[in-house]
Amino acid sequence: MAGSHCEICRRIELIDHHQSPYFVKELSTGYVVLGDTQYFKGYTLFLCKKHVTELHFLPRKYQDLFLHEMSLVSEAVAIAFKADKMNCELLGNGDSHVHWHLFPRHIGDAPKPGPVWWVDPQVMYSPEAQVNSEQLRVLKKKLQTSLDEVLSK
């Protein structure tokens, strides 16, 4: 791990200590977790196990497997949350540890068509976008079921 200055490494440490309520499943190259906020129901992250700041810094075989697993996670999210479209983003401007943002999108799910980042942050991260423990349990169950289905193909 890269240490206490990396938010993604900190989240992985919580997963490793069974302290993350958002953790869904461990794959070979990363961890599937639900997003802290759920303005877009089913918003999921895929956190790389290796601390690198750029995708191209991963060893080629690991990189290929990481991308393949991300695709499977995206498929599972799409199925679990009946997405009309998936938005998959690898940004790292805020947390420079390779991780994917996977947004299941639905027609009319935002004030205007476009990327998720066009939604006002005060709305996207508002208390209304938080989920309680029961809602989180339901979201996790849907995603776990869908992941098991996709991974068994």
Image (cartoon, helix red, strand yellow):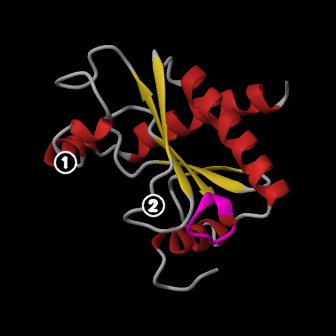
Q: Earlier in the sequence, mark 1 or mark 2?
A: 2
- For residue 3: magenta? no
Mark 2 lies on residue: 92
Q: For the residues marked 1 and 2, what is the alpha-carbon distance in whole angstroms?
A: 17 Å
Is residue 119 left or right of 12 when viewed as pictured? Answer: left
Question: 83 above or below 21?
Answer: above
Name the residue: 45% across, 15% down: 84
Name the residue: 19% across, 48% down: 121
Kindly identify which numbered label has been placed on residue 138. Answer: none
Q: Secondary structure at mark 1?
A: helix
Which quadrant would residue 109 be assigned to in this image?
A: top left
Q: Nearer the viewer, residue 26 or 63?
A: 63
Which quadrant, please, contains the N terminus?
bottom right
Mark 1 lies on residue: 121
Residue 142 in the image, given as x and y percentages of width and height: 58, 29
Question: 41 above or below 125?
Answer: above
Which quadrant, please, contains the C terminus?
top right
Q: Nearer the viewer, residue 80 or 9?
A: 9
Is residue 123 left or right of 61 when viewed as pictured? Answer: left
**Which amino acid does the dot numbered 2 rest on?**
Gly
Question: 30 above or below 103?
Answer: below
Q: Which residues are magenta?
A: 48-56
Circles 1 and 2, Cβ within 8 Å, touching? The answer is no
Residue 63 in the image, given as x and y percentages of width and height: 75, 54
Q: Secondary structure at mark 2?
A: loop
Crowd rating for badge 1 (residues with CA inside 10 Å; few <14, some 14–19, many 20+): few
Residue 107 in the image, given as x and y percentages of width and height: 33, 14
Chief secondary structure of the magenta portion: loop
Is residue 77 left or right of 25 when viewed as pictured? Answer: left
Mark nearest the camera among 1 and 2 is: 2
